[in-house]
Amino acid sequence: LLLKVYGKVQEIKAKGTGVLDAFINGLQQLLKKTISILEYKEHSLGEGAEVSAAAYIKIQVDDYEPLYGVGINSDISLAAMKAVISGYNRVLETKSGVIKSGGDLFLSPEDDPILKPTVTEFSRELWEG
């Protein structure tokens, strides 16, 4: 999995019980932070096969105050990962007292944080580690 961190493309390789667990494990290794998902909710944003999904994640980074992140994508796994990135950025923005628009302070989701060409390749690689 390729991800932009502080503007630099980094590779994450990790295993987990599922895609989101593997993503969290990889982030923890890369960022040297303890990341915990305290709550997770998801729902569709309409009806039909081409509808987007929203994921809401309450995240705790190290011992900082937990905050929520939100991610939207047509693939629920990508929506969940975007929610993790959103929550991570919010936690560290709050900790530092620096608020920037666009969510580009720490992990950079503005061009889609996942740089792989297709969700299938991305999900398979992350799942199999």
Image (cartoon, rainbow, N blue to C red):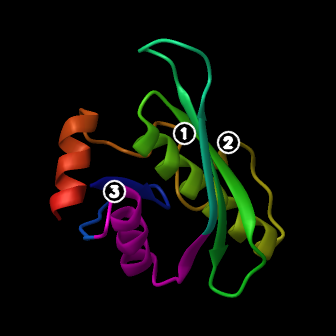
Q: Which residue is mark 1?
A: 110
Q: Are marks 1 and 2 in contact (CB under 8 Å)?
A: yes
Residue 32 picture location, percent across and down: 46, 84
- The front one of 78 and 97 is 78
**Quadrant position of the C terminus in the picture:** bottom left
Residue located at (47% from left, 51% from top): 81
Identify the residue at horizontal 74%, vertical 72% (top origin). 66
- In depth, the one of 55 and 122 nearer the eye is 55
Does dot 2 land on a helix, a strand or a loop?
A: helix
Which stretch appears magenta?
A: 16-37
Q: Image check: 12 left or right of 34?
A: left
Q: Amino acid at mark 2?
A: Gly
Density class for disc 2 (Cα within 10 Å; few <14, some 14-19, many ≥20) is few
Q: Secondary structure at mark 3?
A: helix
Q: Residues within 10 Å of mark 1 (few under 14, many from 20)?
A: few
- Magenta stretch: includes residue 19: yes
Instruction: Note whether residue 8 is visible.
Output: no
- The front one of 10 and 55 is 55
Q: CA distance from mark 1 to mark 3?
A: 21 Å
- At 41% from the left and 15% from the top, the residue drawn is 49
Which label was assigned to residue 102? 2
Q: Nearer the viewer, residue 5 or 114?
A: 114
Please give the residue where the numbered disc 3 appears in the rendered image. 19
Q: Is residue 68 above or below residue 74?
A: below
